[in-house]
Image (tube, rainbow, N blue to C red):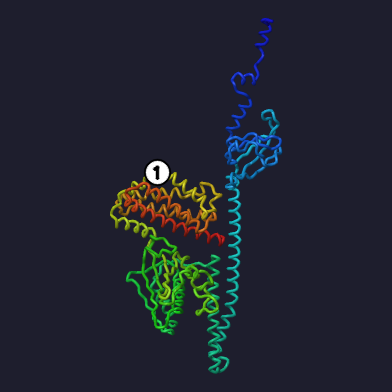
Amino acid sequence: MIDSPRQDDELAKVEPSESSRQAVLGVRPRDQLRTIIEGLPDGIVVANAKGKILFANPAAEKLFGRSASELLGEPFGYPLVVGETAEIDVIQRGGADTVFAELRIVETDWEGEDSFLISLRDVTDRKRAEDRARQLAEEREARLEAEAANQAKSAFLAIMSHELRTPLNALLGYSELLELGISGPLTDVQREQLARIRMSAQHLLGLVNELLDLSKVESGRLTVAAVKSEAREAIEAAVALVHPQAASRGLELKVVASGSPLSYIGDEERVRQILVNLLSNAVKFTSPGDTITVKAGSSTAPDRDARLQSGKAYIFARVIDTGPGIPEDKLAAIFDPFVQAESGTTRKKEGSGLGLTISRRLARLMGGDLTVQSVIGKGSTFTLWLPASDDFDRVVTATIEEDVEKERNIEGLVEAGHALTRELGPALQRIVQRIQSDAATNMAAGLRYSQIADHIGAFLADIASALVVIEEFDGKPSPLLADATEIQRLVSERHGAQRAALGWTESALRREFVIIREELETIVNKHFNQRHRLGEEALAIVARFLDQSEYLALRALEAAQTAGRNGE
């Protein structure tokens, strides 16, 4: 039968269906859906009513660590509840790693069978960031609790020290009155017993004073002066105070000092206290008839174990004895509170074990340090380091320029500066990534990129600029180099204060500078490659700037932490 023209017109008005168009194009709805699902970044799994996996897209293969052929027919392993949103753990092949996924389930028809479409979004990074943030918060809370407990202990020590000093002073006063015979004449035996009472009371008073100093240092309530003083005067005063004690044991006190002025910035009374403590210890442990030597001088290269800046000028006073020496494994511990090289009830020398602790902390409060070197059977050398009174910037800049003058070959520094400038962006990214992932700087895990990179970019740019300036001015002093030093000082101090505000510790800040140093060394070594000598010269100057910056940042960190404890 042939259709009439009218029927043809009516058929022409009927729109073809979507399925008809896809059939014409050769694309079936199921194939189109599969194509879309396979391209999704989220893992998609289709499971039947019994939970057997019918399909898995490439993202799901990556999430499970298995191919689709391995997954097909396997049970999904999690209850399939439509509309549920949950976080699940996905253990990858072999149990080598666990990832976290956010799960959503909807019903669907898959190849004519009622099934479940399961969406799996990888949230491992977010989960781990949350865990790191939680851990960081717990660590901060624990640190605050520890600091509060330490401050409570220090406050208790301070109160008890004051309470103990009052009766001890009364005991000393009354014993002296009795010795003077005010209450009547004394026999020789009574006078001897009073002398022992007075000596014991003085000993107890000395221990109480040490406890009071320690509590003040630990609670941040001890302040030291920062005035220009002469090292020889402090040494002579300390020697005069200890001389009777040394003479009673037949010891000679010898002072050796350089002819040039030895002016330092610090607290003269506290410096004398440190030296008296060092000399008293030397007298205790030196055999009768030997000599104790005090050497004084200045240096820009402090001991390697000193917590000081290598390019800065320092005044030092070394107390050298010929005693039994200190075992190497106890050299660090002797600066801890209540620790002595000799321990137990059989130790030969009395004392609280606080003298060296207080001395080192006083030295560091003044911007210096206290170090020790010892050889068993030959004696020990304790060195007090104090900042020289010379202007800081002038000394550091002069030191850099002196290093350049010694070599007289600064060719290539401009190239090194330009190389650092070109690598600034990538280097900064690498530094931030390493800080975020380093175990020693775990407090950075939850910080934003800008918080970590805060001052580092400006600091690296300043170093690059300084290298160019040094070569262009042929290593001579210049206003631009002085400006670079001033910029470095400002940036470093701000950086230390910012790290303190974020809860960083001294060890974390030191580790940060190790990372910066390694990245800069990598750039310089990569640039010079075959011209190793020029690379060494550039690295030496870069090291000077890093030393200076680390020192300033640490000082600013410590000052900010002290101000925070004092509620300033």
Q: What amino acid type is highlighted by mark number 1?
A: Arg
Q: Horizontally, is 528 left or right of 275 in the view?
A: left
Secondary structure type for disc 1: helix
Q: Residue at x 58, y 91 (%)?
A: 183
Which quarter of the figure is the N terminus placed in?
top right
- Which residue in the protein does label 1 denote? 422
Q: Residue at x 53, y 59 (%)?
A: 561
Residue toward you, 162 or 401: 401
Residue 76 spot, x, y in % from top left? 66, 40
Q: Residue at x 55, y 95 (%)?
A: 187
The answer, for residue 319, to whether it is visible in the render is yes
In the picture, residue 266 is in which quadrant? bottom left
Residue 46 spot, x, y in % from top left? 65, 34
From the viewer's perspective, is residue 282 above or below residue 423? Answer: below
Residue toward you, 51 or 88: 51
The answer, for residue 494, to whether it is visible in the render is no
Residue 275 spot, x, y in % from top left? 44, 74
From the viewer's perspective, is residue 153 above or below residue 73? Answer: below
Residue 559 spot, x, y in % from top left? 50, 60
From the viewer's perspective, is residue 426 above or below residue 323? Answer: above
Q: How many marks on residues?
A: 1
How packed mark 1 is, by other alpha carbons closer than 10 Å (few <14, some 14-19, many 20 or more), is few
From the viewer's perspective, is residue 269 above or below residue 169? Answer: above
Which quarter of the figure is the C terminus placed in?
bottom right
